[in-house]
Image (cartoon, grey):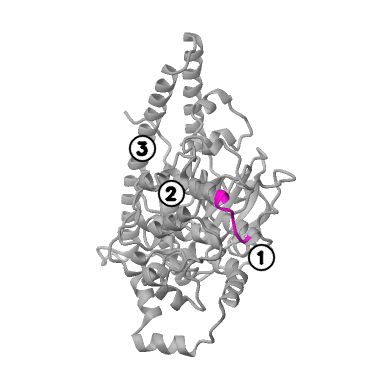
Amino acid sequence: MINDQESVIDVGSDEERDYDEDDDTTVINPSDPLSRSTMDRSLAAKMYIEQYYINAQQSVKDRGQRRKDLEQKLENMKLSSKESNDLRKELDKKESDHLRIRRLKLKRSDFELIKIIGRGAFGEVSLVRHKESNDLYAMKRLKKSEMLKKEQVAHIRAERDVLASANTNWVVKLYYSFQDENYLYLIMEYLPGGDMMSLLIKYDIFTENQARFYIAETILAIESVHSLGYIHRDIKPDNLLLDSRGHVKLCDLGLCTGFHRLHSSEFYQMLVGDAMTIKMKLIEATPLTQTERIASWKKARRALAYSAVGTPDYTAPEVFLQVGYGKEVDWWSLGVILYEMVVGHPPFLSDNTTETCLKILNCKETLQIPTDMGLSKEVIDLIKKLVCEKDRYKTADEIKLHPFFKGINWENIRNQNAPFVPELKSPTDTSNFDDYEELEEDDVKITTTSSNTTTPTKKSNIIDKRNIKDKDLAFIGFTYKGFDAQNKSPNGTRKNVHVESIFATTK
């Protein structure tokens, strides 16, 4: 029997918004059998109920699985009957605490902004501290209106869903997600090591031993996402974060469902046009030497990472063509990253995005591996089998068997020393991230009211309300409180570590 009375579905609580959903200024025309207001409310109710029972059933399933996992692990531990019962009681208490935490209403004002550590086309990421517990988090804040306007709703929902279902050390941990009238928030673990792109910019080229370690960890990270039934579709150095010990974790899972416009056939057609147009563009473009091309790419690399268009360097040809593809597109991206690590730049680097796309589509002819860098035959062979060969690698298992990974301890790699360990002066050290200026808080202007504010007319109020309702419908069910959140709970209390150690994720 489902007795989880807490719904994690919301359309923004009254505490989180200053508009009244029951405002009687909305006029329903009796002669209209299906008014806009009626349809909105009916759809919202349907979505709410469906999501409620989906989440309630999942909650019961997860709770049962945690109990099953505990019992299986207790069988392998030499504990007394009392010690085993104590651990069962501890898990029961954690389950009860989890239900309580799910009822908490989080809002942005619960967190203190320490520093902005990332900014993109749709929002920003900040290091924040929870005011009551003093716990540190990375807060990803996305503007609802921009997400709707730029058709990113499916992407943020995908990211939220994958993060919520990922119980692995290879994916950044999501503790909470919530929303207010104007923004969506993802509260995630803070990984102070920065990202792989920063390492590549700093060191330019990795040794094969260094590349072997990071590629091996990336394989395990990608494999963990595939095991959940997803394809990442956006594997690139920017999305490989490093924890305090220098180990890899995957982030930015928004393309696990749906496609960025950069990954659409329309975008490809826009870039390519007819053959004559392409040739003219390439002829008219000022050619760069390879040295100039690499220098230009490195200079613009970070800006590209945060732009709305992004960079196509790591995108498999099947994604551009949309001819049907599977998990192999993530392994293609892995091969491109390996090439960049040992050569110093992506393999299809060009003067412009159009030419890069064309090179990718003709990768069998355009992939050139330098012969003057002393690369081993193993790394060259692996790059080819990931990127350009017709029967290229499609599974993690066959990649792991490649001679390049001889000596890798796949089961224990996360307990080994990473090639580069971040030098951190404090828990709030952000030296591995770029600096960003704080922008004016436009949401304050939106949500703050005053006594001398002009009251909107009845007509404008109806229009605004309908827009808000559309916004609410798009983000029903976004709120989430993870089971691990109680270990960093907003009430400031710390839980017993024994069950935590038993449930410590190692896969």
Residue type indicated by callout 2: Ile
Q: Residue 222 bears which disc, if any?
A: 2
Q: Report the residue that reaches farthest toward the top.
A: 81
Residue sitting at x 36%, y 67% = 317
Disc 2 from disc 3: Cα separation: 24 Å
Which residue: 37% across, 41% down?
A: 55
Q: Going from the N terminus, do you reach mark 1 or mark 3 first?
A: 3
Image quarter of the C terminus: top left
- Residue placed at 50% from the left, 60% from the top? 339
Query: On the image, numbered disc 3 is attached to which residue?
Result: 58
Q: Secondary structure at mark 2?
A: helix
> What numbered label is drawn on residue 439?
1
Q: Is residue 323 magenta?
A: no
- The residue lying toward the viewer, choosing from 502 and 443, is 502
The secondary structure type at the circle numbered 3 is helix
Q: Secondary structure at mark 1?
A: loop
Look at the picture and state if 303 lies above or below 127.
below
Question: In the image, is 32 to the left or to the right of 224?
Answer: left
Quarter of image, res 384: bottom left
| Residue interval drawn in magenta | 204-210
Label 1 vs label 3: CA separation? 39 Å
Q: What amino acid type should be assigned to the residue bearing mark 3?
A: Gln
Image quadrant where residue 135 sits: top right
> Closer to the camera: disc 2 or disc 3?
2
Residue closer to the observer: 185 or 460: 185
**Residue 111 location, x and y as percent?**
64, 47
Looking at the image, tell me whether mark 2 or mark 1 is earlier in sequence order.
2
Q: Foreground mark, 2 or 1?
A: 2
Left or right, 405 with respect to 391, comes to right
427 versus 184 height, above or below: above
